[in-house]
Structure formats: C-alpha cells, structure tokens
Amino acid sequence: MPGWGGGSRWAFASACCVAALLLLPAAASAHAVLETSVPEYGAVVATEPNHLMLNYNEDVVPSLAQVSVLTPQGHELARSPRVSGSTVTVPLRSGPKGSYTVRWRMVAADDGHVTEGAFSFGVDARPVAPTPANGVGIPVAPELLVWLQFIGVALAGGALVFRALITGPAVRALGRSGGSDGGAAIGLAAIGAVLALHAAFFAFLVGAYPVVGGGVGDFVDAEIIPIRLSTHAGQAFTFSSFAWIAVIALIVGAWAYPRRREALLGAAGGLSLAIAFGLSWAGHPDAGGTLLLLADYAHLLAAALWVGGLVALVTLTASVRSRSGPEREALFRACLLRFSAIAPALVALLAAAGVYVAIGVLPSVSSILTSRYGIVLVAKVSAFAVAISLAAYHRFSVVPRAAAGASAAGVRRTLAAEVFLLAAALALAAVLSQTPPPT
C-alpha cells in the first residue's frame, strides 16, 4: 500500500501469519491424555495378550472408565477394567489373529473432563486403521471437503504456476514491466490456501472421529494422535497442515516484499502442487502400488494446472486495470496463445493418467455400469469430456483467430464456462474419492 514502510509491511505480514494460525480451530485442552499402552498402538505382537494396559497423564474415575477391544470380526474381548490411579488394566478374553481395535473413554478425576480415543494393534498380523464405531458420524459431507481441497490446490497451485510460466514470460515478451497483476494473484492464492487448509483439517476430523466414537458434543475431546500417525490419511493431514501454513506465509511475504514477489509466489505455487500428493496418498489408488499412486497424482496435477490456468486467464484483464485497453488486450492474447500451447499436453496427461487409474482400480469392464464407483466414474469422465470439447473449440477456432490479430475479448465467457464444467468434474472426482471401489 502507498505510504507503508518496510517496518509496517513486516508488522502486517507477521500479523497475517498469526491470524492464519488462529483461523485453525483450536483443540480443547484434554485432561486424561493416553501417554503409553501395552501393547502400543500400531504394534504387532506374536501372541494374543491376556490383558491391555493404558497409562494416562493423570488419575481417572474408576467407575466411569470404559474400554472396548474388538476383534477383526467385531467381537468384544474386553472384561471390566481395573483402575489404579492413572493406570487402567483391562483383562482380555482369548481371540483370533488379526488387527484389534481399542476404543476407550475416560473421565479425569480432578475436573470430570471427558476424553476418548482409539487405536489398533495386530496379533501376528499387520494392524489396520481402527474400525468406525457403529452409529457415529458427523453431518458434514466428506466429498465437499475433498472438493474444496481440489479447488484450493487449483487456486493456490495451478493459478500461481500459470502466472510464473505464462503471465511473466508474456509480460516480458511484450517489453513491459511485470507485477501489476500481483494483487489479484495474491488474493486468489490466499483464498485457495486458506480454503484448502481448513478443508483438510475438517476432512481429517470428520474421518477420524467416527472411529473414536462418542457423541458429536465431545468432538473436540477426541484423541486422534494414533490415527494421525499410523494411517495414510493422518500422515497426509499432518504434512498438508504444515505445508499449507508455509504456503500462506510465502503469499503474505509476497505481498509484504514486492521486490521478491515473483520468487515467493512461484515457491508458493510449487509447494501447493506438492501438497496435492497427500490427496492421492490418502485415497484409494495408494492400495494399488506406486505406479497407480503416481498416476493418480499426475491426474490431479494436470487438472489443477488446467483449472488454475483458466481461472488466472479469466481474471487476468480485471487484475491489470492500470494498463490501457490495448495493453490489456495484447497481454490477454499473449497469455491465451501461450496457454493453448501447453493445454493439449495437460489434457493428454489428464486422460492417460485417468485411464491408467481406472484400469488399476476397476476389477472388470462390467463393473463400470454395475457398481456405484463405476457409475460415478462415468459421470466424471462425461463432465471432463464436455470440458475438453469446449477446450478444443478454443484451441482450434478461437486461438487461430486471436493469433491472426482478432479480438479475444469475447472468449472470456466461454473460458468461464469451461472453468464451471471443470469445477463440476472435480466435484464428481471428490465423490469418487470417497466411494469404495468394487471388489
């Protein structure tokens, strides 16, 4: 802002970083925190234990201690727990080999605060994520939260990378100084990063809390550290949370230091695209091996670059109001031509990676029409196909006319329509990510 010195910008940037951290919902201070257990969460024991021991950081109320230990078939093995101060010992019935789910609920002796948690361990078998508690759920659609993460990656990653690869070179090729669109780029990227950060946070909690069990009113008291550390979804959430905060810091730094704006925004864009790997890591393709996981990530990257590039292109002229009308037209035409040169490669990567993932996930061709996963996949492919048709119209009709010197102003509406179609396709992709593949 005019009149702001370096110190003022630094102070404002610091305040923005603090505000971004405060935007994260704060977890309530839990009291009876599980410190250690025998067996430990994620452990593999050779023989079935005859008891389970839970050690908390403070004393718990003996009469209110609740512990459940479930076999892979859902049979209860836990007997009545015995409490001695902060140690809870649970005798166990004999059970089979496999992954056991432990679910506990304690009341702190000092203030009556309730905490609960869940973890799993294996008896001569690799433990898997704890099974969800029956009848427990959060009234938030996980598909919506995944879709918001997709949109965040496109805005913070795709749009900023577009600016680095397309807008910057186009401005330099026209012989003009760059950076006049910085405010719009920073605004879009900040919206995307904050949106994705909070969507990732709530998506993890929504997925983890039904595993822990209990009522919605005790949501913030759930201890989810075992789920966060021992599952891919939890590991992806941990990585993405810190990474999105770093992206926000880079964006704020770009606003505070215009001289380093291009480098900082470019770094923020690249890091945002790297964060997208967590969405693939926590999804269905990870179970299919490394190649399938990488193909899914490539599919998501291509979509993010396509959507982000279109959003940046549509908002370009509005973000350079300081330029004259002919300058804005020349810049838009240059960016349109440059983007059209790489768009076919993005579409090809999107299609090839999507086909590979579909082949790897679907057990047979017939499952395309006989399973919910297959039907949603068909709907998603159809939405992308319509968007690709509109992109082909731009590539083979509009771009040649623009290259010949015709005005490209009228194409913004059809580009906006293409963005809408791609957003719908990403929504279907989010639904697909939450739909179990057929077996």
Image (cartoon, rainbow, N blue to C red):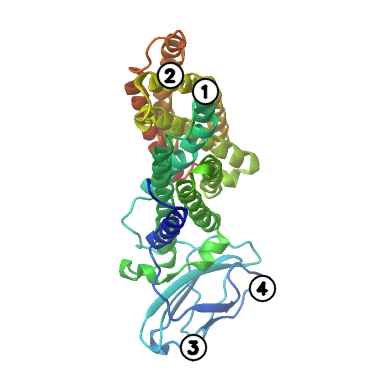
Circles 4 and 2 in contact, beta carbons < 8 Å: no
* Left or right: 392 in relation to 92: left
Residue positioned most to the bottom: 84
Residue under label 2: 330
Q: Which residue is mark 3?
A: 82
Determine whether label 4 and label 1 are within 8 Å by CB. no
Residue 376 seen in the current view: yes
Q: CA distance from mark 3 to mark 2?
A: 77 Å
Question: Which residue in the structure is indicated by mark 4?
Answer: 47
Q: Position of residue 414 (x, y in %)?
A: 34, 21
Badges 3 and 2: C-beta atoms under 8 Å apart?
no
Query: Which secondary structure lies at badge 1?
Result: loop
In 3D space, how far apart are the residues under numbered discs 4 and 3 (Cα atoms)? 22 Å
Circle 1 is placed at which residue position? 175
Q: Is residue 317 left or right of residue 258?
A: left
Amino acid type assigned to the residue bearing label 2 in the image: Ala
Dot 4 alpha-carbon crowd within 10 angstroms: few under 14, some 14 to 19, many 20 or more:
few
Mark 4 or 1, which is nearer the eye?
Answer: 1
Q: Amino acid at mark 4?
A: Thr
Q: Earlier in the sequence, mark 2 or mark 1?
A: 1
Estimate the x, y position of residue 118 in percent, counting from the top left: 48, 69
Of callouts 4 and 2, which one flags the residue occurring earlier in the amino acid sequence? Answer: 4
Mark drawn on residue 157: none
Which element type, helix, strand or loop, lies under badge 4? loop
The residue positioned farthest toward the right in the image shown: 46
Q: Are marks 2 and 1 in contact (CB under 8 Å)?
A: no
Q: Nearer the viewer, mark 4 or mark 3?
A: 3
